[in-house]
Image (spheres, rainbow, N blue to C red):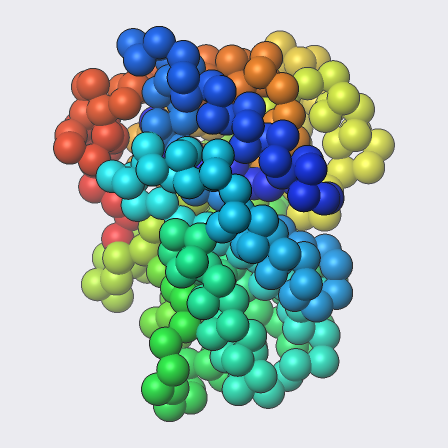
Amino acid sequence: MRWRLELTHKKKSDLDKLLSTLRGHRDAPSASRSAALVRNLAGFNVPNKDKGKKFLKDTLSWLESNEDYHVIKGLATENEWEIVVHYSCKFQNPERWKPRDCVDDFVELGTQLEAAGGGGALIVTGSKPRKNDSLALLRQLSSEDRDTPTPDLHCAFNPFIEDEDARLREYGRLEEKLATGLCQGVWLQIGTDEDLLVKGLEHIRKLTDRGGRHVRVYGGVFLPSKQLLAQQRFRPWAGVRLGDEYLGSVEGARQITYRILKIFREHSVVPLVESKIYKESQLQELAAFLGEGGAEDGAEGGDDGRPAKTRRMLG
């Protein structure tokens, strides 16, 4: 199963350690689930909660200069390797309201992304509504005549909102984001309500079928652990909705994660692992999750490595 990893490093040495661990993991016997894990890695996401773009730019430079990174990327050529940076209107764009300023940001980041193997930018609002939110930025960018190429742009969507009125507003915002014609990918928030997840994915399909668009769909998941559950019980991430069964025990969280990943497979959603990965045992556990019930390394699927019955991407 193709998958992506969100980088959680705070300094270069943390990133170097992760890349070294991943490279060592790919040297496992070729027939093993461990080797398939790294071969099916389709890229990294780079979030940034610091003001400005320095951390994003530093991370892209660190990746580009790291030998282990290029070895890992070289295994994933057929998986359309991408680095996706998170461009937050709260952190990267607090004062840059003019779309031309943001285009300049994207062009600058795009040059570094190209050097690191190609990629795009996920535009998010941040934790609080604000005038210069992601939808407003996409609208303004779409109304501009631009002759400068920028990276692929992506948008976020939360299908797990429980309040119906608020959920319908989120559905409407996604429709407006896709209507700009700029979004090449949709990134789902983490959640555990399987019915709401399926409804959200069906909504995306309706929008993309109606507009004749092709968008890639990605969904966030955690690697369950005692530490994660304690954190999410007492200091949950903004917008993340985890049910009592998930938060009640590690085993309960694992079973829900298996079911969420099954839905992802059925709808051709690429999982984004948002947990901090820093040791071999975590990669072994992750390999078991991503290999559970699905084709490994394309063995039971089509040429693109997905199970044949779910090969068509949304839209």
Along the line of sight, the residue nearer the viewer: 214 or 58: 58
Residue 275 drawn at (x, y percent): 63, 31
Q: Where residue 213 appears, x then y in whole percent?
A: 26, 62
Estimate the x, y position of residue 77 in percent, counting from the top left.
Answer: 28, 40
User: Residue at the location (42% across, 88% down)?
Assistant: 144
- Residue at x 58%, y 49% (from the top left corner): 62
- The answer, for residue 145, to whether it is visible in the render is yes
In the orientation shown, which residue stands out farthest toward the right?
234
**Residue 301 versus residue 16 in the image, above or below:** above
Q: Position of residue 163 (x, y in %)?
A: 63, 49
Vertical side of 50 occupied by 36: above or below: above
Query: In the figure, is residue 78 to the left or right of 93?
Result: left
**Residue drawn at (55%, 28%) of the image:** 20
Left or right? Give the position of 83 relative to 190: left
Q: Is residue 236 above or below residue 225?
A: below
Of residues 107 and 206, the one nearer the viewer is 107
Q: Is residue 158 left or right of residue 40?
A: right
Q: Quadrant of the N terminus?
A: top left
